[in-house]
Amino acid sequence: MDKKEKRIQPTDFLSQTIDVLGEDFWQEMGELIPNTGPRFDIYYTSTSVVVLAELPDLQTPDQIGIRLEGQTLVVEGEIPRLYPVTENRISRNERFFGPFRRSLLLPKPVSADGIKAKYRQGLLIIELRIEPLSEQKNIPVEFG
């Protein structure tokens, strides 16, 4: 009789870690890891690649730049801190503020045509059309 290996789910692992190390463990670990920019998600459907970015408090389109370099999407800008406080008065700093630049390798080949970008309620959504795969072509090799 074959025994199937039980895979540990991420939620089970987190729960077990909290049971052993305590709830403060993840908060303390999070403070050790530098926050270098806004968070991004990338997923794809049968027709498009979708990139989502948390970019709070942007007011104008000139605060964000987006460009496609081959199959890499470059997103750059600056997230403003809208409350006037100095760094030494912040007791917890989990959100990212300041200038950023991210280069995101896309999971599927995309077309430079028809890229759509929308910003609403602090979320940037970029939709890129997947480029259909070209037919395979044999390439002759020259000798001589």
Image (cartoon, rainbow, N blue to C red):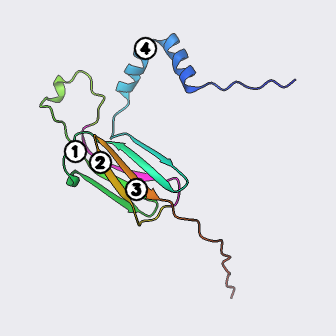
Amino acid found under the numbered disc labelled 4: Glu
Q: Amino acid at mark 1?
A: Leu
Label whose residue precedes the other's in the sequence (2 or 4)? 4
Looking at the image, residue 5 lies above or below residue 120: above
Circle 2 residue: 119
Sequence-wise first label, 3 or 2: 3
> Nearer the observer, disc 3 or disc 1?
1
Q: Amino acid at mark 2?
A: Tyr
Q: CA distance from mark 2 to mark 4?
A: 35 Å
> Disc 4 and disc 1: Cα gap in Å?
33 Å
The local secondary structure at tag 3 comes to: strand
Report which quarter residue 27 is drawn in: top left
Give the number of the mark in front: 4 or 1.
Answer: 1
**Rendered position, 58 above or below 93:** below
Distance from disc 4 to disc 3, alpha carbons, whole Å, reads 37 Å
Q: Which residues are magenta?
A: 97-109
- Of tags 3 and 2, the one toward the viewer is 2
Q: Which residue is mark 1?
A: 58
Q: Is residue 106 magenta?
A: yes
**Mark 3 residue type:** Leu
The residue lying at 16 percent from left, 23 percent from top is 89
Q: Circles 1 and 2: CB distance less than 8 Å?
A: yes
- Decide which of 4, 31 is in the foreground and name it: 4
Residue pictured at 26% horizontal, 39% vertical: 56
- Residue 23's disc is 4
Q: Is residue 75 left or right of residue 87?
A: right
Residue 84's spot in the image, x, y percent?
12, 31
Give the label, 1 or 2, closer to the camera.
Answer: 2
Q: Secondary structure at mark 1?
A: loop
Q: Dots 4 and 3: beta carbons under 8 Å?
A: no
Which residue position holds label 3?
Answer: 73
Tell whether 14 sits left or right of 25: right
